[in-house]
């Protein structure tokens, strides 16, 4: 298992709430900050409007990138939901992660709506490595 992802509880709660709001479609968003510590979460628009795919709306993504750069922050994590499957990267998720080897990928599974599950991964060269989510 790789280095744990450290998150304040409210960020995890915000991601789960976003997944529930966008259900039955997948949600998506970005977390950024400095020194490995999340400073902001962007609950983005899924331009795919799909229960099986996500894509951060391009204009939103550009604005997010600009803010991250202007603040001198790091792009720390991408999150999205799986509405009917486990919190594990799909082959599409693995392919889309390829350009981001230093980024965490968080998946919120709503397979059991009463008990959403969140898991974090690093995906490098097609290899999926689960990492712990440590609440700080």
Image: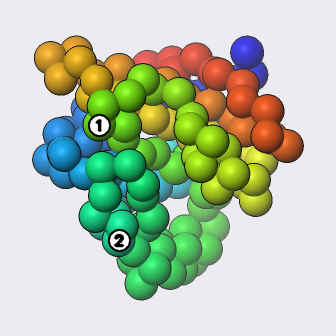
Q: Position of residue 107 (x, y in %)?
A: 45, 35
Residue at horizontal 30 percent and vertical 49 percent from the top: 51
Q: Position of residue 39 (x, y in %)?
A: 45, 50
| Residue 133 visible to an observer of this rendering | yes
Q: Are marks 1 and 2 in contact (CB under 8 Å)?
A: no
Q: Is residue 88 left or right of residue 17?
A: right
Q: Nearer the viewer, residue 68 or 30?
A: 30
Q: Position of residue 110 (x, y in %)?
A: 27, 28
Residue at horizontal 15 percent and vertical 17 percent from the top: 114
Q: Which mark is residue 103?
A: none
Q: Residues within 10 Å of mark 1 (few under 14, many from 20)?
A: many
Q: Assign the C terminus to one quadrant of the image.
A: top left
Q: Residue beneath label 2, please? A: 47
Q: How is the image coloured?
A: rainbow
Q: Residue beneath label 1, please? A: 83
Q: Nearer the viewer, residue 8 or 25?
A: 25
Q: Please determine whether, in this image, residue 64 is positioned above or below residue 52.
A: below
Q: Please determine whether, in this image, residue 112 is positioned above or below residue 46.
A: above
């Amino acid at each position: 298992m790789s280095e744990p992802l450290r998150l304040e509880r409210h960020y995890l709660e915000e991601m789960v709430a976003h997944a529930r709001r966008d259900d039955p479609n997948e949600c998506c968003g970005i977390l950024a900050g400095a020194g490995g510590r999340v400073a902001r979460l962007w609950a983005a628009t899924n331009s795919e409007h799909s229960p099986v795919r996500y894509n951060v709306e391009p204009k939103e993504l550009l604005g997010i990138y600009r803010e991250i750069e202007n603040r001198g922050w790091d792009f720390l994590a991408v999150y999205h939901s799986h509405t009917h499957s486990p919190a594990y990267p799909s082959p599409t998720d693995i392919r889309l992660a390829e350009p981001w080897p230093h980024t965490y990928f968080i998946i919120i599974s709503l397979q059991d709506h009463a008990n959403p599950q969140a898991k974090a991964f690093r995906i490098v060269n097609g290899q999926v490595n689960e990492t712990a989510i440590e609440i700080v």
